[in-house]
Amino acid sequence: MIRRLLFTLAALFALALSPVSASAQTAPSKCTGKFVNPVTDICWSCIFPISLGGAKLWPGRPDTNNPDFPICACGTPIPRIGLAVGFWEPARMVDVTTKPWCFPNLGGLKLDPGFDIGRGQVTPPQMGGGRTANTANYHAHYYVYPLLYWMEILTDFLCFESASFDIAYITEIDPLWNDDTLTTLINPEVALFANPIAVAACAGDCAAATARLPLDELFWCDGCNGSMFPMNGNIAAHNSPVQSSRLAAERLLFKMHRQGLAFGTAGSRALCGKYIMPILKKSQYRIQMTNPIATVSGKYACSPIGASTMPPDAGRSYPVGGEDFGYLLWRKRNCCML
């Protein structure tokens, strides 16, 4: 009897010390999210200001520089005369989640491709280099989302992007997204900015982005959120879920520009068409949260890249149902309206 009891206790002790099976370790929790309502979940005041040349027809939030002259000409061999207009358009969306194949902006859709790609995680505080830090790793998805064109707010307006909804990029199948070493293939300049002086300069970008617009000259900085490098989902300084998820979304946007999948649309150079922009011009974008809780009003509802996440997004992340994030990217558009 005693021998049987000892055997049972030993078996239970061994079971308690044994590692959890791989399926149990990697089984993701429920994917959460909701479809973006184009009426109630969009900050429609973010479309302003609207400009004609250098004049503001309808004032609004801080704006990038517009062409000074209201008349423009595009086309060859005989140029056509038009008006130089400027506005902000909801053009792209981004999912950010630790759960692979989870799409918060598609109503919490969870795909099952039949193979394990590995899930992201947020690690607890760990001591490293004499300080305590949290880290995180995210998956992300990039959508084409030309909302103004779909809703036909203005018909026959050639400046709207006439595209269809599309999931343009998913990081689950990108070998560079979770590997800092492989990522240097597309951002080799990271070696130039891995020093205290370059990092300290990002404090100025943080202040500028929160007050008005980010500093495009400091392209390696993501303002208050951290560094744009490496261009992947590995977040070395996870201060809050909103801060680190925004950083992952903004890194993905930079990655799209670096890979030629996103283009410049602001300034005089963009009047006659989009242009290649391998170095992200941060002031061209604003970012608005759509999941788990949409920010639709207030000064910071669609804040610039690198702006502080404290004013607009505090309290918009919560356990279980509020851990998968969705963002809407507002893009500045300068166009010659023919």
Image: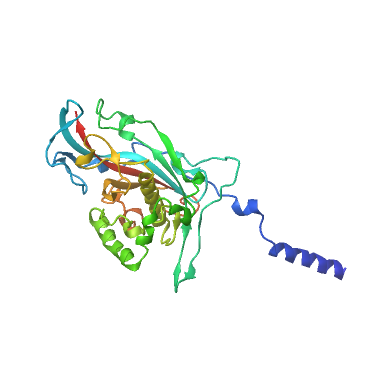
Using residue 71 as the reference point, say whether residue 1 is left or right of it.
Answer: right
Above or below, comparing residue 37 to residue 157 in the picture: below
| In the foreground, 126 or 67 | 67
Q: Quadrant of residue 201?
A: bottom left
Q: Identify the residue at image location x=43%, y=51%.
A: 185
| In the foreground, 313 or 61 | 61
Question: Does the image show residue 315?
Answer: no
Q: Identify the residue at image location x=47%, y=70%.
A: 128
Q: Identify the residue at image location x=28%, y=32%.
A: 160
Above or below, comparing residue 20 to residue 84 in the picture: below
Q: Identify the residue at image location x=49%, y=46%.
A: 174
List x then y, in percent, for residue 280.
Answer: 31, 49
Above or below, comparing residue 130 to residue 85 in the picture: below
Using residue 274 as the reference point, say whether residue 324 is left or right of it.
Answer: right
Question: Looking at the rendering, in which quadrant would you find the N terminus?
Answer: bottom right
| In the foreground, 185 or 196 | 185
